[in-house]
Image (cartoon, helix red, strand yellow):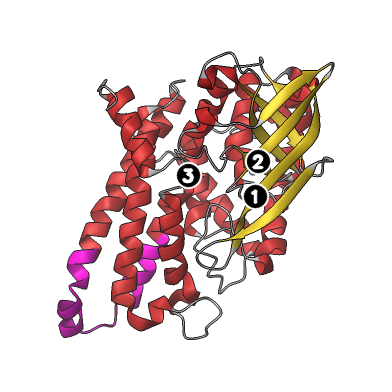
Amino acid sequence: MDFAPTPAMDDIREEIRALLASVLPGDWQGSGFLPMDVRPEHFDLARKLDHALAARRLLAPSWPVQYGGRGFTPYEQFALFEELGYHLAPRMTTISVDLVGPVLIHYGSDEQRSRWLSAIANDAQIWCQGFSEPGAGSDLTSLTTRAERQGDEYVVNGQKIWTSMAHRSEWMILLARTSQELPRGRGLSLFLLPTDSPGIEIRAIHDAGGEHMLNEVFLNDVRIPASQLIGEENQGWRYATTLLQYERGDVLLIGQYRRLLDDIERGLAGATRTELARSNARALLAECEIEWNVGRLLTLRVVDMHTRGLLPDTEASVTKLFMTEAYQRLAAVASRIGGLRSILRHDDTLAALGGRIEQAVVSSTIGTVMGGTSEVQRTIIATRGFGLPRG
């Protein structure tokens, strides 16, 4: 594996930096909630950026040209996403581009690809992910939402929870049970569902920071045309695990981590030697520097596997586990070094880094749960990676 940057990657970084400079305010502090910016006051800016990226075919850059992409290699896409993360770019299309798109490219019909990939890449269509349920979060194969075939339609009943940005989304990729006879994951199917369908009710869930990103979604006799089933019936778990591996290989966190670390180090540039020694800041930041380099290399390993046509499994879980926990440690270090100002929220003018440290503490905790908890990732690594028996 050769991780040295190519001239094409350098060109992409320059292009995206110029675009971001033309869209984002000069004093932009962003939010601690990447990959999606959940603050209502940032929504219009996020949409402006999404449309600016789409106009340059940079919203879904690795997709084929006929679907609105530019055919980027995985390494070129890595360069672009790392820059987006570093500049704290507000986006509303992360699930659309990074999760829904790859599943449609791999398993969707020609009609589905033509209709939805183009809408995502060219029109910045917002999607959400209807997977977790009150009794099926870490163990999705135990979900109970049912989709029953009735002629040319499926009728769906059930409940989803922790559905990020459902209240802003136009469409949902939905995982539901289509067979009661087949065991667990073998009886699940994936569907494409408009969020304004009759029978859908979306209720807000406010997180520990008071932000509205998460939702409950209730489905009562919701009808989905059979043409909006992805692939084959009862094969949805196989397709969903593909989606989850893309979710666990997120590059934005690498850039976001680097930005917070740089900002902390810049903030300490004028500190005296006594102040640095008292807080042990240098030793703490050295550990964070090491962890960033390790996490970046793990992420690049996933990128390299995509380059060679391989689908990461254990490798994506290792990366997700390490980076989300490393970011949690970085947030704790930032809070410790930043002192009392670091616990102030973004709406306080005295808050360090515009409140981003406080937000990072909250969102880094959420990050170890979203996309599969750290405990789930360790189980995947143990069983699939090392072949250990389940306890």
- The residue positioned 58% from the left and 51% from the top of the image is 15
Q: Amino acid at mark 2?
A: Gln
Residue 175 location (% of width, % of height) = 62, 30
Q: Quadrant of the N terminus?
A: top left
- The residue positioned 42% from the left and 70% from the top of the image is 357
Q: Is residue 336 visible?
A: yes
Residue 207 location (% of width, % of height) = 54, 61
* Residue marked by disc 3: 79
User: Badge 2: few (under 14), some or many (20 or more) residues near its Cα, within 10 Å?
Assistant: many
Instruction: Look at the image and give the residue range highlighted in magenta.
Output: 259-284
**Viewer-proximal residue among 119 and 5:** 119
Q: Which mark is residue 159?
A: 2
Indicate whether residue 58 is drawn in magenta: no
Q: CA distance from mark 2 to mark 3?
A: 38 Å
Relative horizontal placement of residue 168, taking residue 160 as reference (left or right): right
* Residue marked by disc 1: 216
Indicate whether residue 266 is drawn in magenta: yes
Q: Is residue 256 visible?
A: no
Q: Which mark is residue 69?
A: none
Residue 289 location (% of width, % of height) = 26, 57
Instruction: Check disc 1 and report its element: helix, strand or loop.
Output: strand
Q: Earlier in the sequence, mark 2 or mark 3?
A: 3
Instruction: Check disc 3 and report its element: helix, strand or loop.
Output: helix
Q: Are marks 2 and 3 in contact (CB under 8 Å)?
A: no
Most common SS among magenta residues: helix
Q: Amino acid at mark 1?
A: Glu
- The residue positioned 36% from the left and 47% from the top of the image is 323
